[in-house]
Image (cartoon, helix red, strand yellow):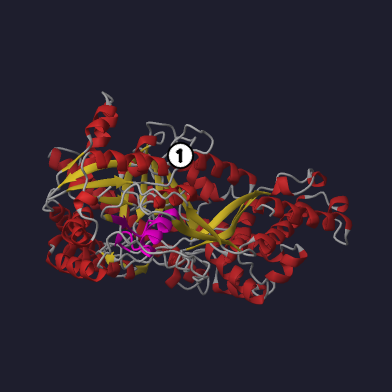
């Protein structure tokens, strides 16, 4: 059987022959950038339609999706294009498919010139508006959700939209300045005090500086930059994980993926005109700092105490350049949380701390000894035979915990974004005798079943697996397999729902030497496979629904694969042949009932549920007041609720958690490692989810699962 890479190269090589010898003789006639762009789009479309797991039918319906997605991305907040502009562009809404077949960029060329002109027009708006004081006593509001906004009817309407946006941003900056002044006065009553008018002027000047920087960067955006946005509107109609990487972007991706660059360790994506956090790299500065989460939208970036730079609407690679930096330097990110609130997060850049990305364990001393393993990711070092592999590491941690006398095990996969599939399969095999773990299917072939062929059971005792909305990919495979085998109790909140596999194809490698004059072309990241549970259902979209669902502060917010643009659908194939776990049947109904009773009596879970409902209301309420008095009252109310939640956290019963003695000895005298180890334990001692997992093992699983003496 041909590999996907080989098949892709053959497809493009055959296509290249057509380009060189057929009626579309580009190479001999057109050695211009336009000629290269025609080759690029035709090669990409050939690769997409031949190699994608579920190729799209390129027709008028496809064209409409591309049109809508592209318009959203070039002007999500509707601050550039007029309604009349959009209407003029609509004649192309069903023509993009025809243009793609011809290798034409007509729609892109027209829209690129138009958005470029409108951006230049808008530069005069912010300068004029910010030149005069705002009246914050006036009772007016602004809509902050771009999806709910309409395009301006005319330039006067557009200018009014700009006025409200600039007033809102000045209001936020003004409140920050007032708070800073108040804190300074509390420390020193003789500290300099500015009048309200002086503070308002300073706030306006800061916002103007932000926009000066923004428009300086916008001026540097060229047509090729915009072309990448257009091409990715095309690729993302196939699915959100398929995309085109021009040569510069691909090199940036390689640096980020291999972790060779000093920075903050967050995977970012450009979506709806915003820079969104998709994943936090285990062991990275962001991971250790703890406040930056998947789903956060980065609005501004500041270097230490310097002025923040607005990154909304910025190209992703430009935003990344601002966020990256040398070890030891601080970057301050202003982020918009999923609930609509804003937060400034200071992160000190560093090299990724690899130890924090590896499996770690501890013993929980309660009524019984419960083992705990935190797995941040399914890592694997395929380049080094002596490197670290998550499957082998978890096996080793289990052995250490067994020797320490553990009577139940909690495997924590919360915020685990996945990684090595082979390690997920190996890890699942630690808990069952043998059998299928996951099914992997390509578009044209049968599903391939990946099995655990090792009959040895590393651990046969009570097992709880913790998951949340940020548990994805390989995490979902492991949790799903243990759920299908009825081997473990899955506890937490529904997982992310990513059940697809991507592969990079270098276009330069695929196209023959006759095209060397046009290279480099960049790369295509293509969805080529899909994961299926052994029960036949895919983890795509639906993820894994826990056996015991616990309250989650983000439970009602839109998050996960299903919220992406054009995700691949859920479907089912034939189940694999497997037998459920026989060594101690689990009474899931009884466990769910008991957990429900405990949750109802737990004040902290009640508070989390209240917080989830509040966050949902805040998220839905996208209209904000532009009146200073009202805005400050809203902020004060939100802060009071937040403080109430933080205070309640201190009342959570403290679990007795200890690192294993051999792990403490391994830390030696490295003060940084010792500090991180203490922080690891501290974060667990008042973790209400771990507390419930312990209760499930002690009160429910031991009554129906393998008795203590029978635990391997």
Q: Is residue 57 visible?
A: yes
Percent coordinates x, y for residue 655 in the rendering: 15, 48
* Left or right, residue 278 beside residue 691: right
In the picture, measured across the screen, residue 74 lies left or right of residue 110, that is left
The residue closer to the viewer here, 704 or 597, is: 704
Q: In the figure, 326 relative to 333: above or below?
A: above
Location of the N terminus (image quadrant)? bottom right
Q: Position of residue 335 (x, y in %)?
A: 36, 52
Q: Position of residue 707 (x, y in %)?
A: 20, 55
Residue range (magenta): 464-493
* Circle 1 residue: 324
Kindly indicate the quadrant of the structure image that contains residue 398: top left
The answer to whether residue 222 is seen in the rendering is no
| Left or right of 213, for residue 27 | right
Judge from the rendering whether residue 53 lies leftward or rightward of residue 652; answer left or right.
Answer: right
Looking at the image, which residue sits at the far top? 669
Most foreground residue, 192 or 142: 142
Residue 606 place in picture, x, y as percent: 17, 65
Q: Nearer the viewer, residue 90 or 707?
A: 707
Query: Vertically, is 129 above or below 368?
Result: below
Magenta stretch encompasses residue 488: yes
| Residue depicted at x 44% and y 40% | 389
Front position in the image: 649 or 390: 390
- 530 above or below 325? below
Task: Tell me how many marks there are.
Answer: 1
Q: Secondary structure at mark 1?
A: loop
Measuring 70% from the left and 50% from the top, which residue is drawn there?
A: 6
> Are there few (<14), some (14-19), or many (20+) residues within 10 Å of tag 1?
some
> Is residue 238 highlighted in magenta?
no
């Amino acid at each position: 059987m041909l590999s996907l890479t080989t098949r892709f190269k053959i497809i493009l090589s055959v296509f290249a022959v057509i380009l060189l010898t057929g009626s579309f003789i580009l190479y001999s006639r057109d050695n211009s950038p336009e000629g290269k762009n025609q080759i690029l789009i035709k090669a990409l479309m050939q690769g997409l339609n031949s190699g994608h797991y579920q190729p799209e039918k390129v027709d008028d319906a496809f064209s409409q999706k591309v049109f809508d997605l592209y318009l959203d991305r070039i002007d999500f907040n509707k601050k550039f294009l007029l309604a009349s502009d959009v209407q003029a562009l609509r004649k192309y809404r069903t023509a993009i498919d025809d243009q793609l077949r011809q290798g034409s960029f007509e729609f892109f060329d027209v829209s690129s010139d138009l958005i470029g002109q409108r951006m230049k027009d808008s530069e005069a708006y912010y300068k004029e508006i910010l030149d005069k004081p705002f009246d914050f006593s006036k009772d007016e509001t602004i809509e902050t959700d771009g999806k709910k906004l309409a395009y301006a009817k005319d330039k006067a309407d557009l200018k009014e939209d700009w006025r409200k946006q600039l007033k809102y941003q000045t209001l936020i900056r003004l409140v920050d300045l007032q708070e800073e002044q108040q804190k300074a006065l509390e420390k020193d009553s003789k500290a300099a005090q500015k009048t309200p008018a002086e503070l308002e002027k300073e706030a306006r000047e800061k916002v103007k500086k932000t926009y000066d920087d923004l428009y300086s960067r916008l001026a540097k955006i060229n047509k090729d930059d915009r072309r990448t946005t257009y091409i990715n509107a095309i690729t993302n109609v196939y699915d959100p994980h398929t995309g085109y990487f021009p040569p510069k972007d691909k090199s940036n991706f390689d640096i980020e993926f291999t972790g060779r660059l000093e920075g903050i360790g967050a995977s970012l994506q450009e979506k709806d005109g915003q820079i969104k956090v998709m994943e936090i790299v285990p062991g990275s500065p962001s991971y250790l700092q703890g406040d930056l989460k998947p789903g956060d939208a980065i609005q501004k970036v500041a270097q230490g105490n310097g002025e923040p730079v607005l990154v909304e609407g910025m190209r992703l690679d430009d935003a990344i350049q601002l966020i990256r930096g040398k070890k030891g330097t601080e970057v301050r990110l202003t982020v918009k949380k999923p609930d609509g609130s804003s937060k400034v997060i200071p992160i000190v850049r560093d090299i990724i701390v690899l130890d924090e990305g590896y499996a770690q364990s501890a013993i929980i001393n309660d009524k019984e000894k419960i083992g705990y393993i935190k797995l941040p990711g399914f890592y694997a070092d395929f380049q080094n035979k002596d490197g670290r592999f998550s499957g082998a590491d978890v096996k080793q941690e289990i052995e250490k915990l067994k020797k320490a006398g553990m009577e139940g095990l909690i495997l924590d996969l919360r915020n685990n974004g996945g990684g090595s599939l082979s390690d997920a399969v190996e890890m699942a095999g630690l808990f069952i005798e043998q059998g299928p773990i996951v099914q992997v299917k390509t578009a044209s072939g049968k599903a391939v079943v990946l099995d655990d062929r090792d009959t040895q059971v590393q651990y046969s005792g009570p097992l709880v697996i913790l998951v949340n909305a940020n548990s994805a990919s390989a995490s979902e495979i492991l949790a799903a397999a243990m759920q299908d085998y009825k081997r473990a109790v899955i506890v937490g909140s529904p997982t992310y729902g990513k059940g697809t596999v991507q592969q990079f194809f270098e276009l330069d490698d695929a196209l023959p030497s006759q095209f060397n004059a046009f290279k480099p072309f960049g790369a295509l990241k293509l969805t080529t496979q899909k994961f299926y549970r052994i029960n036949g259902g895919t983890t795509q979209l639906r993820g894994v629904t826990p056996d015991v669902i616990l309250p989650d502060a983000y439970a009602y917010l839109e998050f996960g694969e299903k919220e992406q643009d054009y995700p691949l659908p859920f479907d089912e194939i034939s189940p694999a042949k497997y037998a459920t776990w026989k060594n101690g049947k689990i009474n899931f109904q009884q466990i769910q009932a008991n957990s429900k009773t405990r949750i109802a009596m737990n004040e902290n879970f009640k508070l989390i549920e209240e917080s989830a409902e509040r966050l949902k209301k805040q998220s839905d309420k996208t209209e904000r007041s532009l009146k200073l008095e009202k805005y400050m009252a809203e902020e004060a109310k939100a802060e009071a609720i937040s403080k109430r939640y933080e205070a309640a956290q201190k009342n959570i019963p403290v679990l007795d958690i200890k690192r294993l003695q051999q792990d403490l000895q391994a830390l030696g005298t490295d003060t940084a490692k010792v500090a991180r180890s203490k922080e690891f334990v501290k974060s667990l001692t008042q973790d209400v989810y771990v507390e419930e997992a312990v209760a499930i093992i002690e009160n429910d699983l031991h009554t129906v699962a393998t008795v203590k003496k029978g635990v391997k």
